[in-house]
Amino acid sequence: VGCDRSKNLVDICGEKHFQAFVCDALSVPIRSGSCDACISIAVIHHFSTAERRLATIQELARLLRPGGTALIYVWAMEQEYKNQKSKYLKEKNGSKNKDKEMNTGTAQRPLSDPGPDNSTQDSAWSDQLLKDLNDESSGAKPVADFRLPVHTNRTSFHSQDLLVPWHLKGGTKKKEESVDKMLVPGGSKELEELSPVFHRYYHVFCEGELEAVCRSLDCVRVQKSYYDQGNWCVILEKL
Amino acid sequence: MKLLTHNLLSSHVPGLRPGGGFPLRIEAAEVRVRPVPFNAAFVSRLVPRLRWEALREAAESLGRPSELPPEPLPDYEADEEFLRRLHHVLLEVEVLEGSLQCPDSGRRFPISRGVPNMLLSEDQ
């Protein structure tokens, strides 16, 4: 059985006759200790504080029966590792290879699809404020002037906390179209014709970070910890 | 939502008594029966994971005459007829429209197009 925070995505699972429900990863409505195995793929990196990220792993652990295992994949800060660029970086010059690679079914295929097909030219700093950080950090300094960088897709990450642009495809947009006009400031009449851009929050993980968070929990043991195509991964066992 | 899924779902409304919130009461507006290929080993391995009484109650609440015994039969692994009846109840009956109600708080979670929406509102 699967779950996600997005009702629309879960509805697609339902249309394909998979068992799925809508819920928040911080509060999963499944009875404790009922699962032999759980997977969390490209989820935890969307949570904006260390406390919330830890809480999602605790929730995952709660679902497992003793001896049960969990697999967690999160985006890595290091998109180039051991002199090998990840597929996310390699596909910088266009997505024409993407379909082919997705169909090969090889072990190299990334489990998390990092971001949209289209690259954007913007690497501007966003003025967007993260109210969450203010609300949630207890005892932390006020972050009223905190800004998150907006990532340039298919390039390496320069910050662990960032916004990644996602283009909702309108259907008529051609890949060859220049994307420079996408981010013209408000007021331009070209904006109305173009598909909307959403900024999605990511906290990308450094080497060892995911493992360290998991090790801070007494109820699980880290069985395996590895790097896979731009992702940091752990396999946990419930004690 | 199949009854296998229902057997795993539990209300996560905050402040419930320990062990509370299970099983969710099914209010079904539309139910569908769809054949699923039978896999004896799979069904057999599910038995220790199930809350048996909740499964029986759920099947009965959908108006299906309960084909299940009060307890899993001894040596059920080898009992194909038992496993086939269990397979039918767990995997071939789906609630497409309706709701799930928390037995302790009364909170309802809607099911639409076979998908339960278990999100709690901001203040819960």
Image (cartoon, rainbow, N blue to C red):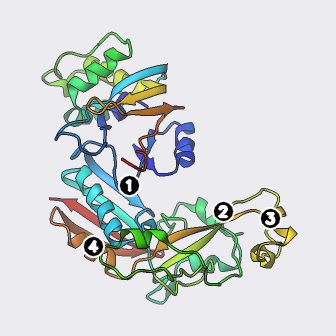
The residue positioned 40% from the left and 77% from the top of the image is A205
| x then y, percent, for residue A34 | 24, 43
Image coordinates for residue A178, horizontal then vertical, percent: 82, 76
Q: Is residue A211 left or right of residue A150?
A: left
Q: CA distance from mark 4 to mark 2?
A: 35 Å
- Name the subunit of mark 1: A
Secondary structure of the residue carrying tag 4 is helix
What is the number of the mark on residue A25? 1
Front label number (4 vs 2): 4
Mark on residue A194? 3
Residue placed most toward the observer, A180 or A137: A137
- Please state which of residues B68 and A118 is positioned toward the viewer in this rendering: A118
In the drawing, what numbered circle is on residue A41?
none
Alpha carbons under labels 1 and 3: distance apart: 33 Å
The alpha-carbon separation of the residues under discs 4 and 1 comes to 16 Å
Which residue is labeled 4 in the image? A213
Residue A13 to residue B114: above or below: below
- Of all chains, the one bearing label 2 is A
Image depth: mark 1 or mark 2 in front: 1
Q: Earlier in the sequence, mark 4 or mark 2?
A: 2
Q: Are marks 3 and 2 in contact (CB under 8 Å)?
A: no
Does A98 sit above or below residue A153? Answer: above
Three-letter amino acid code at the position of disc 1: Ala
Instruction: Give the label, 4 or 3, closer to the camera.
Output: 3
Which of disc 3 and disc 4 is earlier in sequence? 3
Amino acid identity at mark 3: Leu
Residue A156 sits in quarter: bottom right
Q: Secondary structure at mark 3?
A: loop
Give the image quarter of residue B17. Answer: top left
